[in-house]
Image (cartoon, rainbow, N blue to C red):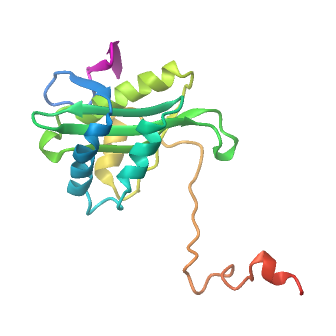
């Protein structure tokens, strides 16, 4: 993946998975892109949980911080794709690394290098921020996303994600009283 910066735009060239062979112009995501981001999210709603895009845009665009990445690629009539990520260092004592939180592409623009161009530009920004590792989480059953990230060089990392279902009636921890309930009055 390679990306060159031209003013407020980045041109990602040679993106893996691109059928068109051409470069996509990647730019900073803007508040005016919110309807396009919502539209793309709605097109994928059957495979992704509902997202409060107002809160996301507030955090990434109206209150940007160092290491935050919010990018878009324009399509013929609207946003063709977007990517959100940020540099984080709090998880499990890991060194600062870039995290990709959201990638969305209009299905009509699929297989044209949009997502790979966004990813290349994000990686260039993460590198410029001084990090050397980029991470993301993908559902193991989401084969298209797994294939996309693997085609772009992502591999399994050193951490294993574990979870605990608080609604599980048979859970041994469910019966434990909250810490405040253990104290006698």
Q: Is residue 130 something one can see in this rendering?
A: yes
State the image coordinates of residue 72 (x, y, percent, origin top left): 29, 33
Q: Where does residue 24 sit, x and y in percent of width and height?
A: 21, 25
Residue 17 visible, this angle: no
Magenta stretch, main secondary structure, is strand
Asked where in the image residue 114 lies, by quadrant, the reply is: top left
The span picked out in magenta is 1-14
- Total numbered labels: 0
106 relative to 69 in the view: left or right: left
> Residue 84 versus residue 145: which sits nearer the camera?
84
Percent coordinates x, y for residue 1 in the rendering: 35, 23
- Residue 68 on image: x %, y %: 48, 33
Q: Residue at x 26, y 39 (%)?
A: 33
Q: Is residue 13 magenta?
A: yes
Q: Quadrant of residue 9?
A: top left
Q: Is residue 8 above or below residue 100?
A: above
Look at the picture and state if 122 lies above or below 14.
Answer: below
Q: Dividing the picture into quarters, in which one does residue 26 lie?
A: top left
Please give left or right for residue 107 compared with residue 50 in the image: left
Q: Is residue 112 above or below residue 105?
A: above
Residue at the (20%, 38%) spot, across then down: 79
Left or right of residue 116, residue 154 in this image = right
Of all residues shown, which one is farthest toward the right?
184
> Is 25 one of the magenta-colored residues?
no
Against 74, residue 23 (above or below) is above
Q: Residue at x 58, y 86 (%)?
A: 169
- Residue nearest the observer in this picture, 35 or 118: 35
Q: The C terminus is located in which quarter?
A: bottom right
């Amino acid at each position: 993946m390679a990306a060159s910066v031209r003013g407020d735009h980045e041109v990602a060239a040679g993106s893996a998975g691109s059928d068109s062979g051409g470069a996509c112009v990647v730019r900073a995501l803007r508040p005016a892109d919110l309807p396009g981001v919502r539209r793309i999210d709605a097109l994928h709603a059957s495979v992704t949980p509902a997202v409060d895009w107002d809160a996301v845009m507030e955090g990434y665009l109206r209150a940007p911080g160092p290491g935050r990445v919010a990018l878009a690629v324009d399509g013929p009539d609207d946003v063709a794709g977007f990517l959100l990520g940020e540099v984080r260092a709090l998880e499990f004592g890991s060194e600062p690394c870039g995290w990709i939180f959201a990638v969305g592409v209009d299905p009509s623009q699929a297989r044209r290098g949009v997502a790979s161009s966004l990813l290349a530009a994000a990686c260039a920004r993460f590198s410029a921020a001084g990090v050397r590792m980029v991470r993301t989480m993908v559902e193991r059953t989401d084969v298209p996303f797994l294939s996309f990230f693997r085609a772009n060089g992502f591999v399994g990392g050193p951490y294993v994600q574990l979870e605990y279902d608080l609604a599980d009636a048979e859970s041994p921890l469910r019966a434990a009283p909250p810490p405040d309930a253990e104290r006698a009055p």
